[in-house]
Amino acid sequence: MVVDEMKLKLNKHWTTGEKPLQWFNTSFLRHSDKLNEFKITLNNKTYKIYSKQRNLPRRTSGKG
């Protein structure tokens, strides 16, 4: 799954003695709107796959 791959990539670059603040890329914090958009897109794609497998009707949010 995507989350597992991301964890593996983070662990691969981790070295002993490093503190999280030393290696954490803070530039992504400036683009939190893009991160949130990515999460929404990922959730939508996951739901589409799930609903096709389960043959469920698509949910509507009721927001206009």
Image (cartoon, rainbow, N blue to C red):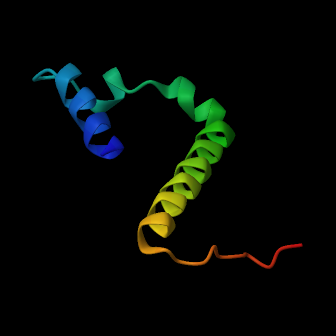
Position of 41 compared to 15: left or right? Answer: right
- Residue 64: % across, % down: 89, 72
Residue at the spot 19% in from the left edge and 30% down from the top edge: 11
Residue at the spot 68% in from the left edge and 42% down from the top edge: 33
- Residue 9: % across, % down: 26, 27
Residue at the spot 54% in from the left edge and 52% down from the top edge: 45
Q: Is residue 17 above or below residue 8?
A: above
Q: Is residue 32 above or below residue 24?
A: below
- Nearer to the camera, 36 or 49: 49
Total number of numbered discs in the rendering: 0
Residue at the spot 25% in from the left edge and 43% down from the top edge: 4
Q: Is residue 63 above or below residue 12?
A: below
In the image as oriented, which residue stretches furthest toward the left? Answer: 16
In the image as oriented, which residue stretches furthest toward the right? Answer: 64
Quarter occupied by residue 32: top right
- Nearer to the camera, 63 or 10: 63
Quarter occupied by residue 60: bottom right
- Residue 15: % across, % down: 14, 20
- Residue 7: % across, % down: 26, 38
